[in-house]
Image (tube, rainbow, N blue to C red):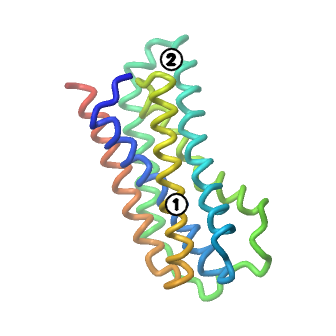
Amino acid sequence: MNLDVMFFINSLLLGLGLAMDAFSVSLANGLCYQDIKFPKASLIAGTFGFFQFLMPFIGWVLVSTVAKYFTFIEVAIPYIALILLCFIGSKMIYEGVKKKEEKDSCPTKPLSFGLLIVQGIATSIDALSVGFTISSYNVWEALLSSGIIGVLTVGICLAGVYIGKAIGTKFQNKASIFGGVILILIGLEIFITSFF
């Protein structure tokens, strides 16, 4: 394994950028469900972390298997990573800028496990594209990178639930903008370093 400093920095930055959607939903959960205790907060954060771990690894598996049969894709990977991360990042920035505060956006039903699974999938589906970003990794590096993303997401989401309980969702759109900027910067870094 080639675990240099850039490996960990990229994994942490990817985790930070990808976790912002889950962080926003965690803020909303904390605001809407004020009676959340630590076990439920841990379940929320763990669910988001699990899906943020799983999706990049699934993406890596898909890219790795496709790349074995279509070697010309390897040349296109930096371009695909740039396009996907810039698209996702731009979408997050757009949503953060355009998001308007709703007076009563809280659901009336309690937070069920089924709803939590839906939230976890919805906030992590874009992480499939990270498979292109980490396509040069071997299986253990891909697992470690995905694990770092997942663990970081757990911490960020746990904080999000408690911040939401304390101050509400006024920072929700700023988190989305911040995450979007990080993903765009990672896309540019992958694209530029592929030529050097």
| Furthest residue toward bottom | 103
- Please tell me whether residue 76 is drawn above or below residue 172 in the rendered image: above
Q: Amino acid at mark 2?
A: Ala
Estimate how packed mark 2 is, as few (under 14), some (14 to 19) or many (20 or more) residues with alpha carbons within 10 Å.
Answer: some
In primary-sequence order, the first of circles 2 and 1 is 1
Estimate how packed mark 1 is, as few (under 14), some (14 to 19) or many (20 or more) residues with alpha carbons within 10 Å.
Answer: many
Question: On the rendered image, what quadrant is the N terminus found in?
Answer: top left
Task: Residue under label 2, please give it.
Answer: 67
Q: Quadrant of residue 44?
A: bottom right
Question: On the rendered image, what quadrant is the C terminus found in?
Answer: top left
Task: Residue under label 1, please give it.
Answer: 21
Q: Secondary structure at mark 1?
A: helix
Residue 57 position, x and y percent, is 56, 34
In the rendered structure, the answer to whether residue 151 lies left or right of residue 1 reads right
**Which residue sits at x=63%, y=68%?**
41
In the rendered structure, the answer to whether residue 32 lies left or right of residue 176 reads right
| Furthest residue toward left | 196
Q: Secondary structure at mark 2?
A: helix
- Confirm or deny contact between disc 2 and disc 1 (CB under 8 A): no
Q: Quadrant of residue 120?
A: bottom right
Which of the two residues, 153 or 65, is positioned nearer the viewer here?
Answer: 153
Residue 39 position, x and y percent, is 68, 67
